[in-house]
Each structure stands twice: as structure tokens, then as C-alpha cells.
Amino acid sequence: MPKRVRMSPEGRREVIIKAAIALTREADGCLDSWSRQDVASKCIPPTSPETVKHYFSQPDLRETVRVLLDK
């Protein structure tokens, strides 16, 4: 079991967004290719799907990634 890591809300959001961006790039830009579980598994430090859900709804996370990748 991974060790629990305390982070600020801003730091945790950043980790989640970075993981979602990485998954989107791995899928050649397809925003519908990943789930909360995929994002949680990609996060460093480890994050649970429930934590991803706490910080972002699925549509909001996909929109955030889309906006950041369009920059």
C-alpha cells in the first residue's frame, strides 16, 4: 500500500492535471481515452480515484486539459 502524502489543494490539482495531460498525449490527444482510475494511477504521488473525483468532475477535468493543451 502506498504511503499517504499530504498536499495542498493546489498541489493535488496540479498533480491530477499533469497526469491527465500525460494520458491525453499518450492517446494522441484523445480526451475520452482515460478514466478517473487511469488518472489516479498515473499520479505521482499516488492518488485515489475518489480524490480525483473530489477535485474535478470528469467534464471539468477534460475541459481543463483541453484548454491547457490548446495553449
Image: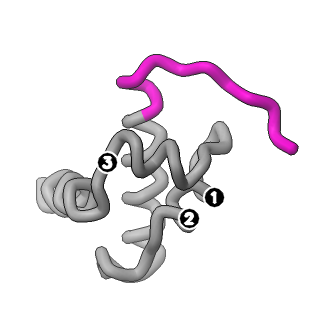
Q: Type of residue at label 3?
A: Phe
Other-residue count near label 3 (Cα within 10 Å), few / some / many at <14 / 14–19 / ≥20: some
Q: Is residue 36 left or right of residue 6?
A: left
SS for tag 1? helix
Residue located at (58% from left, 48% from top): 43
Residue at numbered disc 1: 41
Q: Type of residue at label 2?
A: Gln
Residue at numbered disc 2: 37
**Count of marks placed on residues:** 3
Quadrant of res 20: bottom left
Residue contact at pointers 3 and 2, CB within 8 angstroms = no
**Image position, residue 48 (x, y; %):** 60, 48
Residue reaching furthest right? 1
Residue contact at pointers 2 and 1, CB within 8 angstroms = yes
Question: Which quadrant does the N terminus fall into?
Answer: top right
Question: Within the magenta stretch, is there residue 10?
Answer: yes
Task: Please name whichever residue, 50 or 45, is drawn nearer the observer in this view of the structure.
Answer: 50
CA gap between label 3 and label 2 equals 13 Å
